[in-house]
Image (cartoon, helix red, strand yellow):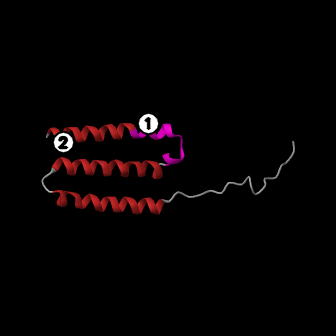
Amino acid sequence: MTDETMTSDEHEEHVHPPYMKVFSILAALTMIELFIPPIIGDVTWLAVTLLVLIAIWKMKLIMGYFMHLAFDARILLLVAGTPAILASIMVIAFMMEY
């Protein structure tokens, strides 16, 4: 067996995910969620739809970066995200019926 030394081209630098950036985006989305009901008023279906869409966006960020699915195979994100998105659609449908 021979020992081969790795050249500088073969070293891959480890890059940390942008946790603070994602946290800031999540905080901003939460602040937006707080102001949607007072601004929208009596149009509950619109408010619920906007809140669910923001929740889906937040879910994607959390699953992608804090659960590290953004760095794994896309099928894992699909398997984990599909039930959450279907549940969100069901909530919107039930709210429209209400």
Q: Which residue is mark 1?
A: 79
Q: Main secondary structure of the magenta part?
A: helix
Quadrant location of the C terminus in the rendered image: top left
The magenta stretch spans which residues?
A: 68-81
Residue drawn at (36%, 37%) of the image = 83
Q: Secondary structure at mark 2?
A: helix
Q: Amino acid at mark 1?
A: Val
Q: In the drawing, does residue 45 fall left or right of residue 60?
A: left
Q: Amino acid at mark 2?
A: Met
Q: Which quadrant of the structure image shows residue 1?
A: top right
Q: Which residue is mark 2?
A: 95
Q: Secondary structure at mark 1?
A: helix
Image location (x, y in percent) of residue 39: 19, 60
Please report whichever mark, 2 or 1, sits nearer to the chain's N-terminal start: 1
Residue drawn at (31%, 59%) of the image = 30
Image location (x, y in percent) of residue 50: 26, 51
Residue drawn at (82%, 52%) of the image = 5
Q: In the drawing, does residue 2 fall left or right of residue 68?
A: right
The vertical placement of 70 against 86, above or below, is below
Give the crowd class for mark 1: few <14, some 14-19, many >=20 residues within 10 Å: few
Q: In the drawing, does residue 4 fall left or right of residue 78?
A: right
Image location (x, y in percent) of residue 43: 15, 51
Of marks 2 and 1, the one in the foreground: 2
Q: Are marks 2 and 1 in contact (CB under 8 Å)?
A: no
The vertical placement of 34 against 43, above or below, is below
**What whole-number distance in Å separates the C-alpha atoms at marks 2 and 1?**
26 Å
What label sits on residue 94 in the rendered view? none
Image location (x, y in percent) of residue 87: 30, 38
Magenta stretch: residue 23 in it? Answer: no
Magenta stretch: residue 70 in it? Answer: yes
The vertical placement of 48 against 25, above or below, is above
